Image (spheres, rainbow, N blue to C red):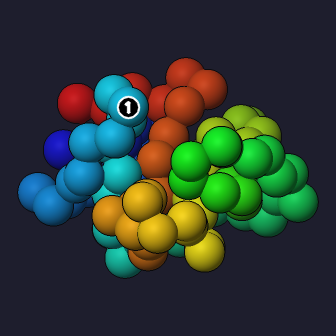
Amino acid sequence: MQAIWKGVVIAESDDTVLVEGNHYFPESALNRSYVTFSNHRSTCAWKGQAHYYSLLVDGELNPNAVWYYPDPKPEAEAVRGRVAFWSGVQVR
């Protein structure tokens, strides 16, 4: 699986976990050269609090395009240490 934005591979792995239609990649698969800070947070009733990263490719910012759960609830333990994508990032 690959996560691609603006023609750039943001993450690539054969080891993804599918949860609610989203592929969660190992955090180690994330190409950090395109990742930048975000202080955005959201809450999922069964997974817990999500934290976000933004993407920066060729000077273009995609805010909060990557999310992860640093301390997921027990029923969502499968997403610990993994990241997922949205906001125009293609996963295929």
Pick whichever, 43 or 62, lies toward us. 43
Residue kind at label 1, given as amino acid type: Glu
How would you rate the neighbour count of disc 1 (Cα within 10 Å): few for under 14, some for 14-19, many for 20 or more?
few
- Local SS, label 1: loop
Q: Is residue 41 above or below residue 85?
A: below
Quickly name the residue at label 1.
20
What x and y, as percent, mark residue 70? 60, 73
In the image, is 16 to the left or to the right of 48?
left
Pick whichever, 28 or 82, lies toward us. 82
What x and y, as percent, mark residue 33? 55, 68
In the image, is 88 to the left or to the right of 91?
right
Q: Is residue 45 visible?
A: yes
Kindly give the residue lying farthest to the left in the view shown.
Answer: 14
Question: In the figure, residue 88 lies in which quadrant?
Answer: top right
Question: In the figure, residue 2 lies in which quadrant?
Answer: top left
Q: Is residue 11 visible?
A: no
Q: Residue at image x 18%, y 44%?
A: 1
Image quarter hosting the C terminus: top left
What x and y, as percent, mark residue 87? 61, 26
Q: Residue at image x 42%, y 60%?
A: 75
In the image, is 66 to the left or to the right of 75?
right
Kindly give the residue lying farthest to the right in the view shown.
Answer: 39
Number of numbered callouts drawn? 1
Pick whichever, 74 or 62, lies toward us. 74
Pick whichever, 15 or 8, lies toward us. 15
Q: Is residue 36 above or below residue 59?
A: below
What x and y, as percent, mark residue 3? 36, 42
Q: Is residue 91 above or below residue 49?
A: above
Q: Residue at image x 71%, y 37%?
A: 62
Question: In the figure, residue 22 lies in which quadrant?
Answer: top left
